[in-house]
Structure formats: C-alpha cells, structure tokens
Image (cartoon, rainbow, N blue to C red):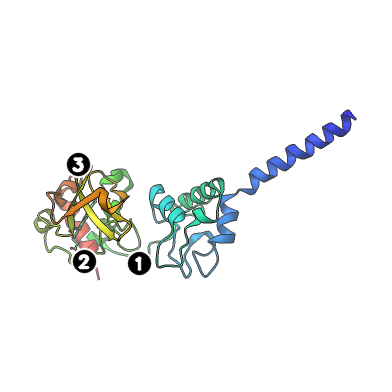
C-alpha cells in the first residue's frame, strides 16, 4: 500500500513539474505569436512587426501583449491567457527584444560617418532613459511615444529650441502634467505623461482628467546628456536619406 501511495505521489509530483515546464514562453510564443502571418519565429517579423533586437521596454511589451493594439491583428491576450502564461510570453518577448535570444538582428540599413555615430547615439544603452529612443523610433529602433518624425531641425540650436505644439497639459486630481494625447473617447482618455522618463502611459475616465492645449514642457529638458557635437551626429542620422 505504501508503495502504491508513493508511486501515486511520484506521478503527481512529476505531473506538476511538467506542468510548470509547459509554461515556456518560447513555446507559447512559437504557437501563438510566432507564425509567419504574425511576428514569425523568434520574432524576426512577418505580417506583424519585428520584435527581435528592438530594445522595447518591458512595460511597453507588457501593455501591448496584455491589452492588444486596437484596430490591428494584435489581440489583448489577457482575454485568452492566464497570468502565468502571459508572464512567460512577456518575459520571452523581453528577452527577444533585448537581443538575448536568437542574437541581435543587423541594423535595417547601414550608415557611414556622422550618421552612423548618430545612429549609435540615438539608442545608446548607457544613457538609460535619457536616450532619444526612449520616446522616438527611427530605423526600426526605439519606442514611438512621440509621433513619427516629420520635420528634422536644420541645426542643433533649432533642435534645442524645438516647439512642442502637440504636448498639452493634463490635470488629474489637482495635479498638472505635460501630456501627449493618444486618444480621447467617450469612455476613456489615453495619454503619455511626460513628467518622467520613460513617459508613463495613462488611461483615465474622461471626467477624471481635464486637458488643455499647450504646456510648459521643454524638449530641451530631455536632451541634457548629449553634447552639441553628439546632437549634430544624431541629426545627421535622422536626416540620412
Ligand atoms: C522624454 C521623451 C523624449 C526624448 C527622450 C526625446 N524626445 Fe524628441 N520629442 C518628444 C516629443 C513628445 C516630441 C513631439 C512634440 C510635439 O510635436 O509637440 C518630440 C519632437 C522631436 C522632434 C520634432 C519632430 C517633428 O517632426 O516635429 C525632433 C526632431 C526630436 N524630437 C528629436 C529628438 C532627439 C534627437 C532626441 C535625443 C537627442 C529626442 N528627441 C529625445 C519627446 C522626446
């Protein structure tokens, strides 16, 4: 009898272990997200954007995987995955995005001289959240908090005195913050709070927030870790044909 109980216990323990192993982010990703129609094997990009070696922040990845991207094929996986599964997939995508799994992808195109220096400076890891790629995307790198680049300033001085008409002011519980508005709907107001870096994505009930045009936010306040020469190189990169 004792043997039988031990055998049963062993089976239960083994089953438990294999269940835990079954929640492998890589396997879930391969099955759910890694098809050619979507992000492809190891996230190199298929019908949906590339995820590998993009330095996307863990918060950004968590938000997109959990809540989806409205109007696209990207579903809100909180509806279909349990928390441990979600966490496993998110951890795997974070590792892909950092280039840890499958190795970093080569840059989409090559640059030379100042533009190449600027490309490296744009997303330089040692600058942490003060780097441009915290808020901008260029050449497939970075997080598109700010709208895509339309006008590239002609000079470093022009970059430093950039006006930011799309930044408004949000007032939440008596506190004002510079805000980049993403959506204003009947049920929700969504914006990036630019108070801190990286900016925080906030979703609020419309009656919990008052939005007014304009702000006292200065783009120059986020350029501080770059010298003028470095900024000139970054502009050369952004301007490179
Ligand atoms: C903390 C976030 C943040 C960081 C970091 C940041 N920017 Fe920006 N940037 C913005 C926002 C927000 C706007 C849009 C403002 C607007 O249009 O009202 C912007 C606008 C710009 C524009 C104008 C684009 C256009 O089409 O009008 C340029 C050029 C630019 N940034 C370059 C840079 C460079 C170069 C760096 C790094 C040296 C950098 N930014 C770092 C948030 C940031």
Name the residue rendered at 31%, 49% in the picture.
202
For this view, does 29 lie left or right of residue 199? right
Q: Which residue is mark 2?
A: 239
Quarter holding the N terminus is top right
Quarter holding the C terminus is bottom left
- In depth, the one of 171 and 233 nearer the eye is 171
Residue 109 - label = 1
Q: Which residue is mark 3?
A: 175
Can you tell me which quadrant of the image ligand 1 is in? bottom left
Cα distance in 3D space between marks 2 and 3: 38 Å
Name the residue rendered at 46%, 50% in the picture.
94
Name the residue rendered at 40%, 67% in the picture.
71
For this view, does 144 lie left or right of residue 80? left
Callout 1 touching callout 2 (CB < 8 Å): no
Residue 46 position, x and y percent, is 48, 69
The correct choice, above or below, for 157 with respect to 73 in the image is above
- In depth, the one of 20 and 235 nearer the eye is 20
N-term mark: 2 or 3: 3
Residue 25 position, x and y percent, is 56, 51
Residue 220 position, x and y percent, is 14, 49
Q: Secondary structure at mark 1?
A: loop
Eye-nearest disc, 2 or 3: 3
């Amino acid at each position: 009898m004792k043997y039988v109980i031990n055998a049963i216990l062993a089976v239960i323990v083994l089953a438990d272990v294999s269940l835990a192993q079954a929640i492998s982010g890589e396997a879930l990703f391969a099955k759910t997200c890694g098809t050619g129609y979507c992000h492809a094997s190891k996230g190199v990009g298929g019908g949906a954007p590339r995820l590998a070696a993009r330095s996307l922040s863990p918060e950004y990845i968590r938000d997109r995987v959990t809540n989806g991207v409205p109007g696209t094929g990207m579903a809100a996986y909180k509806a279909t995955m349990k928390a441990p599964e979600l966490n496993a997939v998110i951890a795997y995508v974070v590792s892909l995005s950092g280039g840890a799994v499958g190795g970093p992808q080569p840059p989409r195109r090559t640059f030379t001289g100042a533009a190449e220096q600027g490309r490296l400076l744009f997303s330089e890891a040692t600058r942490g959240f003060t780097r441009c790629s915290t808020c901008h995307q260029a050449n497939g790198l970075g997080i598109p908090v700010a709208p895509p680049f339309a006008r590239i300033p002609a000079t470093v001085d022009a970059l430093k005195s950039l006006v930011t008409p799309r930044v408004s002011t949000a007032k939440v519980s008596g506190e004002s913050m510079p805000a980049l508005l993403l959506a204003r709907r009947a049920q929700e107001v969504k914006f990036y709070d630019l108070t801190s870096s990286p900016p925080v994505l906030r979703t609020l009930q419309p009656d919990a927030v008052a939005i007014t045009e304009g702000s006292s936010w200065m783009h120059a306040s986020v350029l501080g870790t770059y010298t003028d020469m470095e900024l000139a190189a970054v502009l050369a990169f952004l301007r490179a044909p």
